[in-house]
């Protein structure tokens, strides 16, 4: 059973994935921003797996 909290986490995870892809494809990507976004994405993934 998927809760609304779980669905919200999945939505945030997908949004972070999109932001990472957009930043990666820029002519001069911001490596620090990408690292920060990846850390946030990992935290969400861990919360999804644990929940």
Image: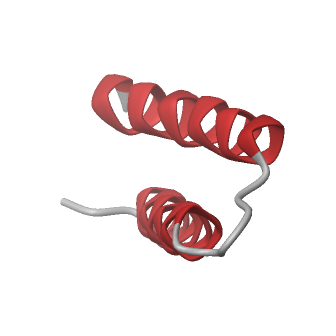
The part of the image, by quadrant, that contains residue 3 is bottom left
Quarter containing the N terminus: bottom left
| Relative height, residue 39 to residue 1 (above, below) | above
Q: Position of residue 44 (x, y in %)?
A: 53, 39
Q: Is residue 49 left or right of residue 37?
A: left
Q: State the colouring used for the structure image.
A: secondary structure
Q: Position of residue 21 (x, y in %)?
A: 48, 68
> Hey, which residue is sitting farthest front in the picture?
27
Q: Is residue 51 above or below residue 3?
A: above
**Residue occupying the far left of the picture:** 1
Q: Residue 38, how many percent across, how many down?
A: 57, 38
Give the residue at x 52% y 57%. Answer: 9
Q: Nearer the viewer, residue 48 or 5?
A: 48
Q: Pick the quarter of the image with the C terminus.
A: top left
Residue at the image point whose x is 44% and y is 69% from the top? 14
Q: Residue at left 29%, top 30%?
A: 49
Whether residue 45 sits left or right of residue 44 in the image: it is: left
**Residue at the location (41% across, 36% down)?**
45
Q: Is residue 42 above or below residue 24?
A: above
């Amino acid at each position: 059973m998927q809760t609304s909290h779980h669905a919200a986490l999945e939505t945030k995870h997908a949004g972070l994935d999109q932001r990472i892809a957009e930043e990666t494809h820029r002519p001069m990507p911001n490596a620090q921003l990408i690292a920060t976004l990846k850390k946030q994405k990992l935290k969400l993934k861990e919360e999804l797996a644990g929940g």
